[in-house]
Amino acid sequence: MDPFVTLARASAVTTKLKLGAGITLIPERNPRRSAAGRDPKSIEVMAYMAPTERAQLQALAEAGTDSAVLLLTNTPEAAALAELEQIAKAVL
C-alpha cells in the first residue's frame, strides 16, 4: 500500500499523532499512484532540502518532482543575500 494513502487514512482519525513519510523515493511515486487508481499528476510532489546543483534539480524534475525547497543557512542578512545570489547563479 502507498505510504501516503496510509498516512492520509491515519490522519483522518487522529489529532494527537504527528505523521510523516520521512524519505520517499520519487521514482516509485508514479507507479504507486497508478496502482492506487490515482492520476499521477493529481498529487503534487515537493522536495524539501533539495540540492542546489542544476543537474540534481533537473533529475528531481524528471523523476516527477513538482517543486523544490532549498535549504539556506541561518546567517546575517548580507550573508544570506550572498548565499541566495550564489544559489540563483548555480540553479538558473
Image (cartoon, rainbow, N blue to C red):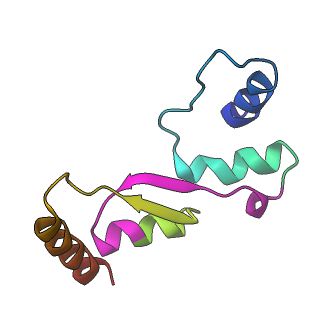
Q: Residue at x 11, y 66 (%)?
A: 79
Asked if the stretch drawn in magenta spans residue 55, the answer is yes
Q: Position of residue 63 (x, y in %)?
A: 54, 62
Above or below — where is 10 with respect to 68? above
Above or below — where is 88 with respect to 64? below
Taking the image as shown, residue 18 lies to the left or right of residue 89, namely right
Q: Quadrant of residue 70?
A: bottom left
Image quadrant for the C terminus? bottom left
Find the magenta span and give its range.
39-57
Q: Position of residue 83 (x, y in %)?
A: 17, 69
Taking the image as shown, residue 85 lies to the left or right of residue 6, namely left
Q: Position of residue 33 (x, y in %)?
A: 76, 48
Q: Residue at x 55, y 62 (%)?
A: 65
Residue closest to the eye, 65 or 63: 65
Image quadrant for the N terminus? top right
Asked if the stretch drawn in magenta spans residue 48, the answer is yes
Taking the image as shown, residue 53 lies to the left or right of residue 15, namely left
Q: Residue at x 51, y 69 (%)?
A: 61
